[in-house]
Amino acid sequence: MKSSNPVLSRLADRSAQHATFHRAPAQQPYGGYGAPAGYPQSPEYAQQYAPPVAGRMTIDDVVVRTVAMLAVVGVFGGIGWFVLPDSISVGVAIAAAMVGLVLGLVISFMGLTNPALILTYAAAEGLFLGVISQSFESLYPGIVIQAVIGTFGVFFTMAALYKFKIIRVTPFFAKMVIGALIGVVVLMLANFVASLFIDGGFGLRDGGNIAIIFSLVCICIAALTFALDFKQIEELAAAGADKKYAWLSAFGIVVGLIWLYLEILRLLSYFRD
């Protein structure tokens, strides 16, 4: 199952190759001498008694690293909000956004699993989010805590829907979500280009009715992509992917959370206006 997240999607191919060459040998019954003649060993029996292998990624590993990345985002977000002087905050936010964009693209397309590099991305995004959040909060008091609650509310709701099989990630579901995601990205780029020549572009970000509908669509798509990511991480763990890929999986989840937070923050600002 291909994830909508390019980070986790690339991981699927890597884990398949890794599992091929590093799969744990199944423990043979009968003291390692194989089954007696006339009593072939069933694959189910061998799989049941296969010993666990250390150094393989688990879902708990992804959870721990995701929490670590969010902690870094939170700490540097506090620095961007409370520590940076107003005279340099905008410049720092722009620089942090550029660093985060470059690191995000490099990590995604090169499939890097270096914890220091991934945590640097989290720090850069934290600075950017801290300055942006402070700006929104100064205009619309209370909006940031509402956006944070909304972001994690959507995330944990999707996690529960996936956990209890209310949402089932089928190939058709995946194609629909990925197609919608591509469509949204294309519209964003088209609106940006149009805004260079037309005031407000196509109206996707000007706070009007079209902008509200577009943000709601983006939030829905962002929420649905989490289901695909949960499925991908589950399959990576089952395939025996190396433990280092837990960092890359956590990176993919955090990227989705940041996008969701910004969309909810933007939507709330529209309603305030």
Image (tube, rainbow, N blue to C red):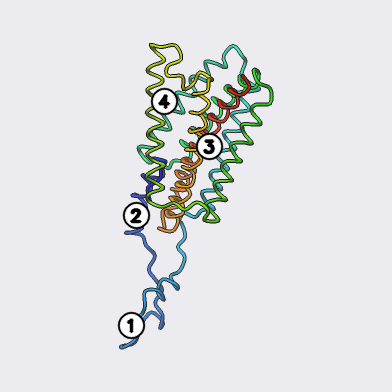
Q: How many residues crowd mark 1 within 10 Å: few (<14), some (14–19), many (20+)?
A: few
Q: Residue at left 43%, top 50%?
A: 232
Badge 4 or badge 1: first in the primary sequence: 1
Q: Is residue 110 above or below residue 90?
A: below
Observer-side mark, 3 or 4, equals 4
**Badge 3 amino acid:** Leu
- Asked whether 222 or 251 is in front, the reply is 222
**Quadrant in which residue 31 is drawn:** bottom left
Q: Residue furthest front?
A: 209
**Element type at marker 4?**
helix
**Which one is nearer the viewer's eye here, 30 or 2?**
2
Badge 1 is on which residue?
Answer: 40
Tell which of 178 and 55 is nearer to you.
178
Q: Earlier in the sequence, mark 3 or mark 1?
A: 1
- Across and down, in percent, residue 170 comes to 41, 52
Give the alpha-carbon distance from disc 3 to disc 1, as whole Å.
50 Å
Look at discs 3 and 1 and give the one toward the viewer: 3
Q: What residue does disc 2 label?
A: 16
Amino acid type at image mark 1: Pro
- The amino acid pointed to by label 4 is Met
